[in-house]
Amino acid sequence: MIDKVRTYADITDFLSIARRYFINNFYDGMLTVLGIILGFFISALRGSQHTMDSYLVLLTGFATSISMFVSGLSGSYISEKAELRKLKLELDKAMVLVEEEQKNEADIKSENEEIEKAMITVNLHRKNEKKKRGIKNPRIKKKKVKTIQEKAERFASIIVSLVNGGAPFIGGTIPLIPFFLTEQANLSTFIHSFLIIFGCIVLLGSLIGFISQESIFKNILQMLAAFGITMVISILLLH
């Protein structure tokens, strides 16, 4: 099984695609739910007791995460399958053109004549055998055998789709963890959620810096900048 996955990865390079989708969509899912949490945070600040029912935050956050999961899963599967199919057709066309250029017209004609003679001989032989034995020739339906290219494409489409849908769902669910621990969310609950998002962003920035061989600190700052901008704009609009 492991050898199969490695072979499929060499053919389609789905690991790099899945890694890119995971980072991007995990980050998108986290920032999307951040906006929701900020909305409830502003609402809690306006209240007299500065509290909020946790189930409201959880229901809204989960509903959004599920929507992102279904959207990412279905959309990615359809698009990736179409792209890989297009790539296969282009490769098949290129191979056919190369084969046609390498063949000589005279050789093709001679081969066709030999094939026709052989087919006539085989058909006559079969007819004679039928007359002698009185056996009907059943029609055997040939089963289409999938090539390793087609199997690799299908496997890659499934894996990439799962990552594309699962990443925003996980990214949107993790910030909701503090709200599972209490029925009434206070300011401390919201702060813990913001800290979780901050920590995840630091980890993502470190991962991107490690993969790209660039400055980890620079990547963390870039992602934190988007995090800060989201918070500032949301607070200004909702306050």
Image (cartoon, helix red, strand yellow):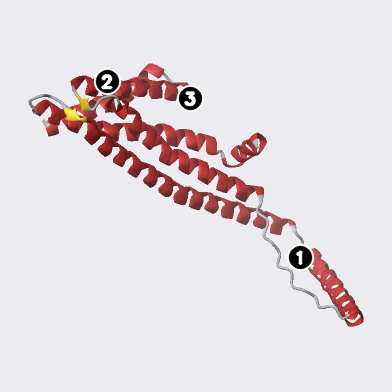
Three-letter amino acid code at the position of disc 1: Glu
Q: Secondary structure at mark 3?
A: helix
In this rendering, does residue 25 appear at all?
no
* Left-right relation of 55 to 159: left
How many circles with numbers are drawn on the protein?
A: 3
Is tag 2's residue or tag 1's residue first in the polypeptide sequence? 1
**Label 3, label 1: how far apart the Cα atoms are:** 52 Å
Three-letter amino acid code at the position of disc 2: His
Name which quarter of the figure residue 14 lies in. Answer: top right
Q: Which residue is mark 2?
A: 192
* Left-right relation of 233 to 195: left
Q: Residue furthest right?
A: 132
Identify the residue at image location x=90%, y=79%.
133
Mark 3, mark 1: which one is toward the viewer? Answer: 3
**Label 3, label 2: how far apart the Cα atoms are:** 29 Å
Q: Secondary structure at mark 1?
A: helix
Q: Secondary structure at mark 2?
A: helix
Name which quarter of the figure residue 192 lies in. Answer: top left
**Label 2, label 1: how far apart the Cα atoms are:** 75 Å
Mark 3, mark 2: which one is toward the viewer? Answer: 2
Above or below residue 39? Residue 187 is: above
* Left-right relation of 220 to 16: left
Is tag 3's residue or tag 1's residue first in the polypeptide sequence? 1
Three-letter amino acid code at the position of disc 3: Ile
Q: Which residue is mark 3?
A: 211
Is tag 3's residue or tag 2's residue first in the polypeptide sequence? 2
Q: Which mark is residue 105?
A: 1
Q: Position of residue 84 (x, y in %)?
A: 53, 49
Are circles 2 and 1 on residues that touch, CB within 8 Å?
Answer: no
